[in-house]
């Protein structure tokens, strides 16, 4: 068994994509018997797992750490990197597993110490900088591209979460040793919540009779949530429940919904344990993402639920989904509304697509398959 320094420059734990992926990975590694020291940002809720020690970098007055590149995140990466280098220098680790920009920042020091580096490419940092508008050109983008290339070339292994990221790594570094390990679902469809629990949730949310659409995730711009809220005004027979979002985002979207007459209920942030009841409540699940290339964490959970899925027809979805598994739409309110109406009007077709999605997930992307892929990757890494 190995001692692993796991570097995650994120709040941990927090219910959103990358922290969820980090929790899944460290849970699997510790369950396999590895000892993991997880270095993360000072923000986040504690997580207790056997053989896991959580270390936190220095707190700075930067406020909430949003998803994606921000000035606050850039500032937090300075003490984070200092702590990571110190831990690597004195911790006697067998492997350093670094997520996103942490791989770029630690790569020179891992090479200097002769410790194998696993670069965990949950997303491409240069691509994030471009898409967010944080750095579309100039020295910061050039530096990010140079550091990413250096980290990928010097890694003992690269872990990706979807085909587009695998292809991107292979284009940049053809000789890279890549392990594609897709995110696991957060729910087990074989143990649905009771009808009483679902009814109680419906009542607590103040939902009227009639069909319900469901969205879960953060409300950052790339997620396309405003498009979904606008779409709801075009499907008045449908109610939308949204889980996630920061208070100011919820307020803005709530005002948008009220102005258009969209029937939206904002349930706030909820722990993962409540997700099965929300999924059971829903008649249709929605992923309205408007940009990006990495498959959203939520898609695997949506597939596991067995509920019909409406998603935008962009590469973030189409590298996993096709028209046999989901209803794919244009990236627009009208497109999403048409997809939602299709599910309501063609229930049998929608259920058949959802059933094929469940079969695909159980065959290729179940929690068991995820654990198998992680164990196989680490067996190869430690054997090298």
Image (spheres, grey):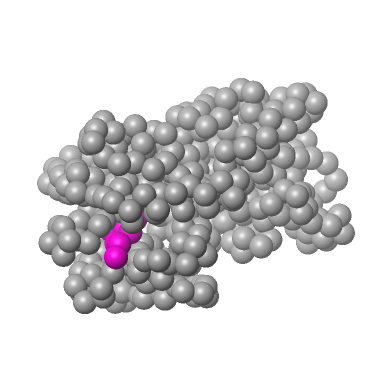
**Residue 371 located left or right of residue 349:** left
**Residue 99 located left or right of residue 267:** left
Q: Quadrant of residue 309?
A: top right
Visible in this render: residue 96? yes
Q: Residue at x 48, y 39 (%)?
A: 295
Q: Which residue is drawn at 83% across and 41% down?
A: 210
**Residue 103 located left or right of residue 257:** left
Q: How many marks?
A: 0
Does 171 appear above or below 381? above
Q: Which residue is drawn at 59% across and 50% down?
A: 368
Image coords of residue 180 (percent x, y): 42, 41
Does 306 appear above or below 11? above
The one nearer the camera, 374 or 125, is: 374
Image coords of residue 98 (percent x, y): 31, 58
Image coords of residue 100 (percent x, y): 32, 52
Q: Residue at x 68, y 35 (%)?
A: 359
Image quadrant where one finds the N terminus = bottom left
Visible in this render: residue 265? no
The one nearer the camera, 58 or 340, is: 58
Image coords of residue 114 (percent x, y): 17, 61
The one nearer the camera, 71 or 92, is: 92
Q: Does the magenta stretch include residue 123?
A: no
Q: Is residue 101 magenta?
A: yes
- The segment highlighted magenta reads 94-102
Does 344 appear above or below 262? above
**Residue 311 located left or right of residue 7:** right
């Amino acid at each position: 068994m190995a001692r692993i320094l796991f570097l995650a420059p994120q709040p941990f734990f927090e219910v959103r994509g990358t922290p969820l992926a980090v929790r899944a990975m460290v849970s699997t590694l510790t369950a396999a018997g590895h000892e993991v020291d997880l270095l993360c940002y000072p923000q986040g809720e504690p997580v207790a797992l056997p053989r896991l020690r959580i270390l936190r970098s220095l707190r700075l007055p930067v406020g909430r750490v949003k998803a994606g590149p921000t000035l606050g995140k850039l500032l937090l990466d300075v003490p984070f990197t200092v702590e990571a280098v110190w831990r690597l220098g004195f911790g006697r680790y067998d492997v350093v597993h670094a997520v996103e920009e942490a791989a770029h920042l630690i790569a020179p020091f891992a090479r200097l110490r002769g410790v194998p580096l696993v670069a965990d490419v949950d997303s491409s940092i240069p691509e994030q900088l471009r898409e967010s508008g944080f750095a579309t050109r100039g020295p910061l983008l050039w530096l990010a591209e140079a550091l990413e290339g250096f980290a990928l070339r010097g890694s003992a292994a690269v872990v990706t979460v979807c085909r587009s990221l695998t292809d991107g790594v292979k284009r940049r570094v053809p000789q890279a040793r890549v392990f594609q390990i897709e995110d696991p679902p957060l729910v087990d469809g074989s143990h649905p919540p009771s009808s009483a629990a679902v009814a109680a949730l419906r009542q607590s949310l103040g939902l009227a009779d009639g069909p319900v659409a469901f969205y879960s995730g953060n409300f950052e711009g790339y997620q396309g949530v405003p498009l979904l809220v606008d779409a709801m005004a075009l499907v008045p027979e449908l109610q939308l429940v949204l889980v996630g979002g920061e208070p100011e985002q919820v307020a803005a979207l709530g005002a948008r919904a009220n102005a258009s007459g969209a029937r939206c209920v904002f349930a706030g942030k909820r722990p993962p344990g409540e997700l099965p009841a929300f999924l059971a409540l829903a008649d249709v699940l929605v992923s309205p993402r408007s940009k990006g290339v990495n498959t959203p964490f939520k898609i695997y959970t949506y597939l596991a639920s067995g509920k019909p899925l409406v998603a935008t027809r962009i590469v973030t979805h189409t590298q996993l989904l096709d028209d046999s598994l989901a209803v794919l739409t244009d990236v627009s309110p009208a497109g999403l509304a048409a997809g939602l109406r299709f599910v309501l009007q063609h229930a049998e077709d929608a259920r058949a697509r959802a059933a094929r999605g469940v079969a695909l997930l159980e065959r290729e992307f179940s929690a068991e398959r995820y654990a198998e892929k992680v164990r196989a990757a680490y067996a190869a890494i430690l054997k090298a």
